Amino acid sequence: MKSQKGYALAHSISFERVRPAIRMQAWWARFKRWQQLARERRQLAMLGDEALKDLGLSRADVLRESERPFWDDPRGR
């Protein structure tokens, strides 16, 4: 059985205050991910042909990836 203290504690949390904070955290995480994608795509575009060969990528692969918009996340997030 649940104790009265646990029950009272569960009802003391105001979810109306928590939801905006959770939404803001999710938005911030998405924003940071978009920044990361844009930075990685710029860095990939700056690599030389030898580095691309080491990675097994062609210049066409890099061009295709670097032209993708920042919000186009391959992880689907």
Image: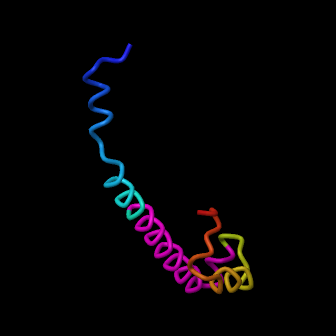
Q: Image check: 14 left or right of 56?
A: left
Q: Image check: 39 left or right of 68?
A: left
On whether residue 47 falls in the magenta region, the answer is: yes
Q: Position of residue 13 (x, y in %)?
A: 29, 42
- Compared to residue 36, the image places residue 7 above or below, namely above
Say which of 63 and 6 sits in front: 6
Q: Position of residue 74 (x, y in %)?
A: 65, 67
Q: Image check: 21 left or right of 60?
A: left
Name the residue located 71 percent from the left edge and 75 percent from the top edge.
Answer: 57
- Compared to residue 14, the image places residue 61 above or below, namely below
The number of numbered discs placed on residues in the rendered structure image is 0
Q: Image check: 36 left or right of 51?
A: left
Q: Quick one: which residue is furthest to the top in this view?
A: 1
The scheme the figure's colours follow is rainbow
Q: Position of residue 52 (x, y in %)?
A: 65, 77
Q: Position of residue 2 (x, y in %)?
A: 36, 17
Please give the range of residues in magenta. 25-53
The quarter of the picture where the C terminus appears is bottom right
Most prominent secondary structure in the magenta stretch? helix
Name the residue located 65 percent from the left edge and 82 percent from the top edge.
Answer: 68
